[in-house]
Structure formats: structure tokens, C-alpha cells
Amino acid sequence: MQPPPAAAGVQTTPPQHGGRAPPTRKLWQRLALVLLPLLALVTALELWMTRHDALEAANAAYDRSLLGALKAIDAGISTASGGLSAELPYSMLEFFELTASGSVYFRVASSDALVELGNADLPLPPDPLAPGVPRFYDANYFGESLRLVAYQRPMPSTASATEAVPGVLVQVGESTQSRQDFTQRFVRRAALRDGLILALMVLGAAGTLALALRPLARLAQEVQDRSPEDLNPIAPQDLPADILPLVSAVNQHMARSQALIAQQRQFLDDASHQLRTHLTTLQMQIDYARREPDPAQVQDALAAIGGEIARATRSTQQLLALGRSDTAALDCTPVDLAALLRSVALELLPQARAKQIDFGIHPPSPSRNMALADAHLMREALTNLAANAIAYTPAGGTVTLAAAGDDLGWSLSVEDDGPGLSEEERATLGQRFRRGAQAKAPGSGLGLAIARSIAQRHRGTLRLHAREHGPGLRVLVWWPTPSPNGP
């Protein structure tokens, strides 16, 4: 079974938060999501570079100490006695061990293994040594990481200048623990410094962001404090240049809203005046009919009442059409102009025949027959123009409906051979409740106003021209082809 329908007038419960779209992040939150990771990345990169530089600086400083100890040992090696003698600088090695904050190792050995001093099993360099060139390298010694320097010294023979005794290998090494401790302390201090700088940067960015967004907050508060009737433009003073386009767009929107409200108020004033006139006339005619004893006069009064009701009905219909043309949303679809002409002509044909008016249409060429417009509003505009032409054209006259199109736009026109209008009247007609000086047919002056409003809604114009040959008037509604980049 299906559930019973909801009772009329009962509103269903709106969806809870689970059915709503997630709220959009605020501007400062978006900036924070971009700036904070970027600042953290820059800080991490700077810290990595600091560690790399600190390691290079520590290696350079400790390597100079190793090289100094090596040269001191090398300076104590002599062959003046005809053999190989080495005087080790123990005091310097002890001092070097203290400054290195770790174990210090050395080795002096001849290549024929006849002389071996110090730590005999120190690791050798991975590559052969070039004579007279110190070589730095890293190695493990009984599970301890060492930094070593090796030096191959050739020893010339005293017996012959062409012979040489075996060379001497000198090695000095130290534990890398002191280097690692130095690097860690340096990097730790750098991390604390960079963390403090990052915190200061975040606070500074937050303060700067708060100052930068203060005009927006002030602008929002100013708009919020306004009364609903206040549609005056927002003053652009003391606002950043980036916000001015937004303020300008808001001002333009408020100006359009203000113009629309003024137009609606004018419409209500005009409509109330027009309807009040009809109601007053009806009341006077009813009062006259009540006082009149002659049945024939009563019948005349009733006929007048019927005519006034018809005029009031048409005025009301025109007012409603004018209201729709001002406020209804456009539904632009392809419109068959030839079919539109035929439909309006068939609707008004009885009125034209009653006045023996030659009523015809002139359809556009097939290639220009389809237009883009709101079909309902365009039919309303053409109907009002054609009804006006039939009303003001003398009996036996001619009224022609036509349509045309080109690359720039389309047009609907109504041409008659009636009395026509002067140039001054053509310039002012189209305003609401304004009629020509020679107008004798009943009406309220809203037909042209409706057509003008519909044309303007389509970004077009209403044009009034005198006939090229003879008296009469040609009224044309023209609207442009929609732009591919806009409405």
C-alpha cells in the first residue's frame, strides 16, 4: 500500500544537516591550507640544507685536525741513520684525542713489514695511494666507525740514487662520534631556530591575513546593518583594489533591483489608477440605471456597463501581460515565425472582418523562419500591436503582419494605413497609459508599452515608423541574435 498523500498546506520537514551540502571553507581557511604546508616544506628544505652544510663544515674541520696529526707523525720519520726511524709526537696525539672527544688511532709501517708502529690492523684505503698525496676515507674498526687519512711516503736510499728502500705508510684515524655529536647539536639548534621562525611566520601571516581581511569584514558588517529598503550604492572608499570589482558588481545589482522596485511601484500606481477609473465609471453607470425609470434608458445604461466591463477586462488582461513581460523569466526556444504570424492572424481575423479590413500576413523566407525567443511573450507583443492596428485603422483599411530575419537578429512588424502618428508622438508612444492625440478607439495605452517591454526583455527595441507611401504606421519589434558568449 502507498502512504496517504500529505494534507494540503502541511509542510514537510526540511532535510537535516546530513542532506545539506557541506559549507564552503572561509577565505582564511583556504589561505591557511595553502600557506602552512608551503611554509612547512620550505622550513624542512632549509633544515636539510643546514644539516648538509653542517656535516660538510664538521668534516672539513676534523679532517684538518687529522691532516695535522698526520703531518706531525710524518715530520718525525727520518732516514738519516741509514735506516728508518720514527719519533712519535705523543703529546700532540693526546691533545688531538682530547679535542676529538673520542678514540684516536695511528699506524706507521714500511711496505716490507720490517717496521710496524701503532695499531697494526687499521683498515687500508679502498684504492691504491698515490705517493705524497693524503687520502681521506671512512671505515669500520672493530665495530666502530672511523674517519682516516693515509699517506704513502717514498724513502730514498743512501747507497744509490737510483734505488729506493720500501716506502712508508702513515695512517691516522679518529672515531666519527664527535663529528656526529657536533652535527646533531648543530642541527638540533637549527631545528629549534627554524621552528621558532616558522611559528613567527605563521603568527605574522595570521596577523597580516586578519588585517587584509578586515575591509571585507567591515564591508559585510556595513551591508548587514542596512535596512531592507536601503539600496544605495556601497561606498568604495578604503577598500582594496581586489574587492572593488565585487563592490561594483554588487552596486550594479542593487541599482537594477532599485530600478525594478521603482518600476513595480509605478506599475502598481498605474494599475490601481486604471482599475479605479473603470470601477468609478461602472458605479456611476449603475447609479444612473437605478435612477432611470425609462426601460429603454436602462437598457442603454446596461449596454454601457457591458462595454465598460469589456474595457476593464481588456485593461486587466493587458496589465497582467505587462506584469509578466516585466518579471517573467525568459524561456528562449526556437520559434517558427510563419506559424506565429498565422496563429495571431487567425485569432484577430473576426475583429478585422467586423471592420471589413484587409488583414494579411507576409511570412519570412524559409532560411530565416526560425528565431530564438520566448514564444509566449512574442505572441503577446504581436497580438497587442495587431489589435491596436485593427482598432485604429478605419473600416475598409489594410493591416499586414510581417516577420524577417538576418545575421543580426529578427523582427516582427505590423503595418496599417490608418491615420498614423506625428514624429513627436512616435518619439513618446510606448510609455504606459500614453495614447496618440488622434486616438478615438477605446483603449488604455498599454499595447505599445507591453510590446516595448517584451522587446527590451529580449535586448531589442520597439520602433515606430511612418509608412513609406501614404498615411499609416509601421510598428516593428526587433531583437538581436544571442551572443555565443552571453545570454
Image (cartoon, rainbow, N blue to C red):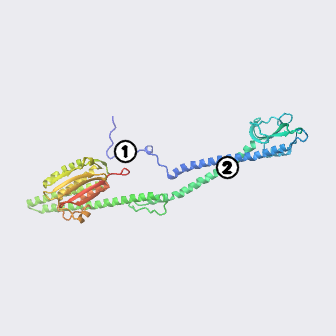
Residue 12: give its label: 1
Residue 309 visible (yes or no) = no
Q: Is residue 446 left or right of residue 73?
A: left
Q: Residue at x 47, y 63 (%)?
A: 237
Report the side of 469 relative to 103 (left or right): left
Q: Secondary structure at mark 1?
A: loop
What is the C-alpha distance between the residues marked 2 and 1? 63 Å
Q: In this rendering, does residue 7 appear at all? A: yes
The residue closer to the viewer here, 82 or 425, is 82
Amino acid at the residue labelled 2: Ala
Residue 371 spot, x, y in % from top left: 28, 49
Q: Identify the residue at horizontal 42%, vertical 60% (top origin).
A: 226
As displayed, is residue 391 above or below residue 331? below
> What number is the disc on residue 163?
none
- Extreme right residue here? 81
In the image shown, does 148 or 278 lie closer to the viewer?
148
Residue 443 coordinates in the image, percent (x, y): 20, 59
Query: In x, y percent, where is residue 269?
Result: 28, 62
Which disc, if any, is residue 190?
2
Q: Please state if 18 lies on the left or on the right of 353 as rendered.
A: right
Residue 90: where, in percent of width, then height?
A: 86, 43
Q: Amino acid at mark 1?
A: Thr
